[in-house]
Image: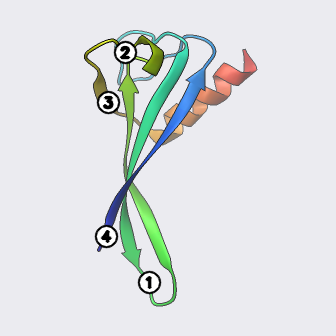
């Protein structure tokens, strides 16, 4: 089986909270890394998500050290949706 990682960016216009973070995070653009593993199928290639990670602080605030935090992708999507509605 093959594993793969993909990177994307998400942008928050307002501060946001996630349950795995003790403090609210400031607005900004954040890097998201998704790890997936291949699901072997008879006629097509498919992948299953195994981890979603958020790099903090925001890219534009990162002047040195940063952390990669394992996050719930559903909670991250909900935080992004809430941010759009504010």
The residue mark sitting in front, 2 or 4, is 2
20 vs 26, nearest the viewer = 26
Q: What element carries label 3?
A: strand
Mark 2 or mark 4: name the one nearer the start of the chain.
4
Residue 56 picture quarter = top left
Residue at figure coordinates x 51%, y 89% from the top left:
43
Pointer 1: what residue?
A: 41
6 to 85, vertically: above or below? below
Residue 37 picture quarter = bottom left
Label 1, residues with CA under 10 Å away: few <14, some 14-19, many ≥20: few
Taking the image as shown, residue 60 lies to the left or right of residue 57, namely right
Label 3, residues with CA under 10 Å away: few <14, some 14-19, many ≥20: some
Mark 4 or mark 1: name the one nearer the start of the chain.
4
Residue 69, numbered label: 3
Q: Is mark 1 on a helix, strand or loop?
A: loop
Pointer 2: what residue?
A: 62
Residue 25 percent coordinates (x, y): 45, 12
Q: Quadrant of the N terminus?
A: bottom left
Mark 3 or mark 4: name the one nearer the start of the chain.
4
Q: How far apart are marks 4 and 1 (CA)?
A: 13 Å
Q: Which residue lies furthest to the right in this view?
A: 85
Residue at figure coordinates x 45%, y 90% from the top left:
42
Callouts 2 and 3 close, C-beta under 8 Å? no
Residue 85 percent coordinates (x, y): 74, 21
Q: What element carries label 4?
A: loop
The residue mark sitting in front, 2 or 3, is 2
Q: How far apart are marks 2 and 4 (CA)?
A: 32 Å
73 vs 58, nearest the viewer = 58
Q: What element carries label 2?
A: loop
Residue 23 percent coordinates (x, y): 38, 9
Pointer 4: what residue?
A: 2
Mark 3 or mark 1: name the one nearer the start of the chain.
1
């Amino acid at each position: 089986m093959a594993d793969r990682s993909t990177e994307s960016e998400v942008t928050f216009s307002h501060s946001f909270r996630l349950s795995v973070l003790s403090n609210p995070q400031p607005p900004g653009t954040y890097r998201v890394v998704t790890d997936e593993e291949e699901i072997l199928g008879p006629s097509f290639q498919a992948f299953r998500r195994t981890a979603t990670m958020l790099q903090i602080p925001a890219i534009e605030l990162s002047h040195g050290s940063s952390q990669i935090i394992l996050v719930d992708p559903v909670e991250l999507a909900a935080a992004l949706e809430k941010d759009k509605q504010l």
